[in-house]
Amino acid sequence: MTTLGTEQRPLWIAVIGAGPAGFYAVEALLKGDAHVRVDIIERLPTPFGLVRSGVAPDHQSIKGVTRIYEKILADPRVRYFGNVSMGSDISHDELLTYYDQIIYAVGAQSDRKMGIPGEHLIGSAPATSFVGWYNGHPYYRNSEFNLNTHQRVVVIGNGNVAMDVTRALLAPVDTLATTDMADHALAGLRASTVTQVVVVGRRGPVQAAFTTPELKEFGELPGVDVLLDPVDFTLDPISEAQLAENKVAGRNHEVMKGYIERGLSGATKSIHMQFLWSPLEIVGHYGHVTGVVMERNRLVDDGNGNVKAEGTGATRTIACGMVLRSVGYRSVALPGVPFDDKRGLIPNIDGRVIDTANQTPIDRTYVVGWAKRGPSGIIGTNKPDSVATVTSMKADWESLNGIADGHRTGYAVATLLTSRSAQIVTYADWQKLDAYETTNGNTQHRPRVKVVDIKEMLDIIKR
Ligand SMILES: Cc1cc2nc3c(=O)[nH]c(=O)nc-3n(C[C@H](O)[C@H](O)[C@H](O)COP(=O)(O)OP(=O)(O)OC[C@H]3O[C@@H](n4cnc5c(N)ncnc54)[C@H](O)[C@@H]3O)c2cc1C
């Protein structure tokens, strides 16, 4: 058998998922002397994962990172198989037959539940689906959000996603209309009667997970007042110590105190940032959300130098017509691949996927990104994370036997996928769709007008 990783016998590697983590893994694999061929398998026709369907439309500059990913897609050693879903179009065992190594870069495609009564009511939705809806993710394009029979939305959670959805609800639609926000969302927001968003965190302002630029953006929204309760800023000793140590918390604190000092301007819209409240129940009438019952918390020492929220028993109800639950994303179990249900991710040691029963690595399978470490970190965080997994993969090359020669041609898997997927989308196909979207965008002075229906995407490619 010829040595693996040579010109005669390159390593064949499959990357499942075309989000940031997948691209950084490919970039790391292509570096070095070994001859490597990479196939990127993505369930959507479009690449770029949450950069396309998560990052807020009013954060266009961040989306510029896709220029790096485009270069990777253009590399002759890389093939793109869009519109191919691992699980339904190709199984884990089949991937093991055709590839020397497999990397799962599937992100976190679901949401964490709060586990409180009323979560199922109409008008209660995970921020995941609202984000997918306004960003034109094909799976969420038909989601319905009632924005025009009430004035108040409660957003539960204190991370940057909570900040993004709040801005989307209250930013001037004419401004959003200069972005790549999906047209159906622009229409929905234009008809919106929402004037107030209450953003609720279970712990205090010092423990909030949002970052300062997002917090400052609240204060820059035209026609929107930011309200905070000074009582929430009387800090316990642990929070005081955290404030002194944590630079982000310190900067956030300054910005929020600035909002308190600024007071109200009489604007017609407002954001109410409320700390130390936990939702107990979402209440409704005839199946529709009418409010959230909240319990007041106090912060207590958790014994590990941190604070935890503890209910005081005091409750109140915030009347509202919609609740967006922004308490975290969660990975989805893939058939034939180990899954840690408690943590909502693919279990691994240094990126090697492990069998949780005996804690040992399974055959030639690796994981990167949010599927590896859970839904935390910005786009850039995925780069060192992917490099670390690829370092494990390269270390394993020495003991790798490799797949059968007949399966190493690249044609075999392409033939199988063609027989399974309705229509494989290649990199050239994506370029065609990209050109279509950006050309339409140019005419409207927008970065692009997104096509949000998979069938329409495939029709445009076929034309
Ligand atoms: C709402 C939101 C806003 C954000 N805003 C910012 C921001 O402003 N700045 C910033 O730096 N970071 C931001 N982030 C974080 C950033 O998006 C993530 O760090 C990053 O996208 C995670 O990369 P990933 O590749 O692990 O997952 P993803 O980006 O989710 O990519 C996973 C890919 O796998 C594909 N996939 C899933 N299952 C399958 C399957 N079975 N078969 C084939 N393909 C599959 C998916 O379609 C997707 O394309 C934001 C995140 C969210 C949720």
Image (tube, rainbow, N blue to C red):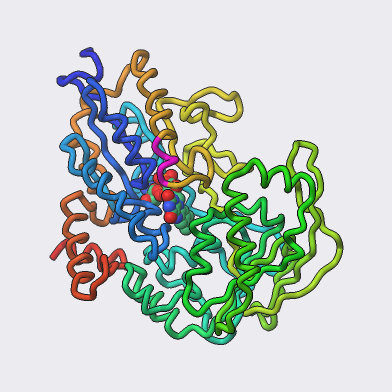
Question: Percent x, y for residue 367?
Answer: 44, 35
The part of the image, by quadrant, that contains residue 316 is: bottom right
Q: Quick check: 119 left or right of 305?
A: left
Q: Nearer the viewer, residue 19 or 267?
A: 267
Asked if 346 appears above or below 240 in the picture, the reply is above
In magenta segment, residue 145 = no
Residue situated furthest right in the rendering? 313
Q: Nearer the viewer, residue 213 or 44?
A: 213
Asked if 54 appears above or below 222 in the picture, the reply is above
Q: Quick check: 316 left or right of 250?
A: right
Asked if 275 appears above or below 221 in the picture, the reply is above
Q: Quick check: 418 left or right of 359?
A: left
Q: Nearer the viewer, residue 104 or 325?
A: 325
Asked if 336 appears above or below 432 in the picture, the reply is above
Q: Which residues are magenta?
A: 379-383
Q: Is residue 123 in view?
A: no
